Amino acid sequence: MALADSRMKLHASPPAVSFDFAGLVSWARGMTGKFENLVVTEDQVPEIKDCMTELNKAKISLDNSRKETVKELSAPLKAFEGQIKQVMAIFDETYKFLGDQVQHFVEQEREKKREVVQGIIAEELEKRKGEVQPFAIPIQDKWLLKSTTLKSIREAVQGIIDQRIESLRLQQQADQARAERASAIEQAVKAANAEYQLELSVAQFMTQWHTSLSTPLDDVCKDITSAAQRALARQAERSVPAPAARRWVAPQTSAAPAVTTAPAAEAGPDKTMSIIITYSPAKEGEVRLALAKLRGLCTTFSARARQ
C-alpha cells in the first residue's frame, strides 16, 4: 500500500462523535428505574401500557439519532470508495485490452500444439494398425498446455491405445466363449434328442441362465437331460391305453403252471474302471451329457480335462 498511499496522498483520520454518554445513561435509568421490582396489579394495566409506549418512543428516538449520525459519518467513506473504484476501472480497462491480445497468441500456440498432438495420435495409431482399427482419441486440454511435454503426451496416447486393444481382446474372448457355449448347448440337445427319440427345441435352452458363462456347463447338460426325461415320461403317459372293462372268468380247476423268475444278480464289492477319452471340441456338449449320465450310474465319479 505504500505506492498507493503516496499517489493518493491519503490523510485519513478515524471518525469521531462527541456526545454525553453518561447523561444518556442517567436519562435512561431515570425513566426505567421506577419500574424495577414492580409487581403489576390488574388495576394498573392501563397505566403500565401508557408507560411502555413512552419507553418505546424514547428508544426509537435514540435509535433514529444513531442512524442519522452513522449516515453522516458514512457519506465521506462512500464517496471515497466510489472515486477509488473509478481509478481502478482505468487499470481494468487496460488490463483487459492487453489480456485479449495476449490470449490471441496463447490460442495460436494452443492450435499449433493441437496439430502436433493430432500428428502424434495418427503416428501411434499407424504403428498399431495391425492390432486395432483407427479410432477417435479426444485431445485433452492439459495436453495443450505449454508445460505439458510431447513425451508425456505420446505416452498417454500409447496408454489409451493399449487399453483399447485389451478391451477388444476381452470382448472377443467373451464373444467366443458365448458362441462355444451356444454350440455346446445345441450339441447336447441333439444328443438328447437322438438318445430319447425326441424333438426338443434348442431355443428353449438359450435362456440367460443356460447361456451365462457363470453357469457350469455340467449343470446345463443335466438340465437338458432332465428335460428330455420329463418329455419322455409325458409321451409314455399319453401312449398308455385306457384300462378295458374287466370280464368275470370262471376259475380253472386245473393247477396253474409254476412261474419261475430269473435269479437276482449277486451283490458284491464295487468295481473300479479307468477311462481315457479323446474328442473333438465340437462334441463338447454330447460328451458332457454322456458323462453326466455316467455319473448317475456310479458310486463315485471323477473326471479331469487335460489341456
Image (cartoon, grey):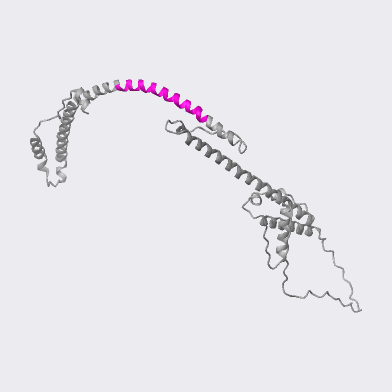
* In magenta stretch: residue 105: yes
> Going 39% across and 21% down the picture, which residue do you hit?
101
User: Does the magenta-highlighted stretch encompass residue 186?
Assistant: no
Give coordinates of residue 153: x percent, y percent: 48, 35
Residue extending farthest to the right is 254
Q: In the picture, which quadrant includes the N terminus?
A: top left
Q: Residue at x 58, y 43 (%)?
A: 166
**Which quadrant of the rendered structure holds the C terminus?**
bottom right
Magenta highlight range: 91-118
Q: Quadrant of residue 264?
A: bottom right
Foreground residue, 172 or 193? 172
Position of 60 with respect to 281 (left or right) is left
Residue 287 location (% of width, % of height): 73, 56
Query: Looking at the rendering, which quadrant does residue 228 occupy?
Result: bottom right
Q: Where is residue 224 shown, x and y percent of the image? A: 71, 55
Name the spot of residue 59 as percent of width and height, x first: 16, 35
Q: How many marks?
A: 0
- In the displayed structure, 156 sits above or below 8; it is below
Q: What's the magenta bit mostly, secondary-structure-wise?
A: helix
Vertical comparison of 265 with 98: above or below: below
User: Is residue 93 shown above or below 148?
Assistant: above
Q: Nearer the viewer, residue 140 or 32?
A: 140
Q: Is residue 178 left or right of residue 201?
A: left
Nearer the observer, 169 or 187: 169
